[in-house]
């Protein structure tokens, strides 16, 4: 974990309200592992005391990039920033995905919206190619599909309104694939909590190991404030763990979902 002032190299709209931000960070970029995140503060937004967490998307040389959606005051200001301006970043943070070993299980990646960002480095560094299942409400919410295809991965898309790929939730084509075969497969997922729960339940049903990047609201990002805790199994009961430090990636079998005893 390193705190540095990083320089913006590019800040471009990729679709609708989604942007790709490229940052020069020579001391941070070489340390990044798949599924880790950066905690960013917009220096010119004086009233914003809290940092914002963003999954690290790509790493190239001394740079790393993030994908973000313009949804509020902070990201509105961020979207207006130009190359040459600077941000404060603490990174890389959190426990990421375990990259499959050579000759290991075939990875199935499941992403909702810009949850795709957390999956790219995993796909790039995996010695086995697999299938990426991408879901979103509309066609404009499907991001980075071509980036994964360029890595040699098969991409299957589902949109809730049917504007791209199959119509419905991304867990529907995932279920169809698991019904076809489960041997030698491992699931990795990042996206909204309802999607993660559905993937976790599918993993349990088909007895497939799964790693889930939990999407919880974070404040400090370094394990101090305890705002991002989730329940995980411990002995005969459960305990709280922090998604910013013990996670964001957890073994699906360890998560205690809302409504479970």
Image (spheres, rainbow, N blue to C red):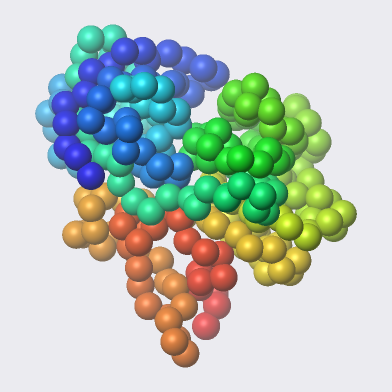
From the top left corner, tell me how far across and down residue 106 is, in percent: 69, 49
In the image, is 2 to the left or to the right of 242? left
The location of residue 145, given as percent across then percent down, is: 64, 26
Q: Residue furthest bottom?
A: 236
Residue 164, by quadrant, is: top right
Residue sitting at x 51%, y 17%: 14
Which residue is rendered at x = 50% and y = 52% of the image?
A: 98
Residue lying furthest front in this view?
A: 102
Q: Nearer the viewer, residue 192 or 29?
A: 29
Q: Quick check: 3 above or below 184?
A: above
Which residue lies most toward the top here?
83
What is the quadrant of the N terminus in the image? top left
One can see residue 65 in this view? no
- Residue under the image location 42 percent in, 71 percent down: 231
Above or below, 125 relative to 13: below
Q: Nearer the viewer, residue 92 or 78?
A: 92
Residue 141 vertical position relative to residue 103 in the rendered view, above or below:
above
């Amino acid at each position: 974990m390193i705190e540095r002032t990083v320089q913006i190299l590019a800040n471009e709209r990729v679709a609708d309200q989604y942007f790709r931000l490229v940052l020069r960070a020579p001391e941070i970029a070489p340390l990044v592992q798949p599924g880790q995140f950066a905690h960013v503060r917009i220096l010119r937004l004086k009233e914003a005391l809290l940092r914002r967490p963003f999954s690290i998307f790509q790493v190239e040389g001394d740079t790393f990039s993030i994908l973000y959606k313009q949804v509020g005051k902070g990201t509105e200001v961020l979207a207006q920033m130009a190359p040459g301006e600077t941000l404060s970043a603490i990174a890389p943070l959190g426990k990421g995905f375990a990259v499959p070993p050579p000759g290991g299980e075939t990875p199935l990646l499941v992403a909702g919206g810009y949850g795709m960002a957390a999956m790219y480095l995993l796909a790039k560094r995996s010695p086995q190619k697999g299938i990426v299942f991408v879901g979103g409400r509309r066609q404009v919410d499907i991001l980075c599909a071509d980036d994964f295809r360029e890595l040699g991965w098969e991409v299957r898309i589902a949109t809730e309104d049917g504007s791209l790929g199959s119509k419905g939730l991304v867990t529907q084509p995932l279920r169809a694939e698991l019904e076809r075969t489960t041997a030698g497969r491992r699931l990795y997922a990042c996206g909204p909590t309802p999607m993660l729960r559905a993937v976790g339940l599918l993993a349990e049903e088909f007895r497939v190991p799964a790693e889930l990047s939990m999407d919880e609201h974070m404040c400090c990002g370094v394990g101090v404030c305890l705002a991002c805790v989730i329940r995980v199994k411990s002995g005969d009961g459960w305990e709280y763990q922090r998604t910013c430090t013990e996670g964001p990636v957890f073994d699906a079998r360890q998560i205690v979902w809302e409504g479970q005893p």
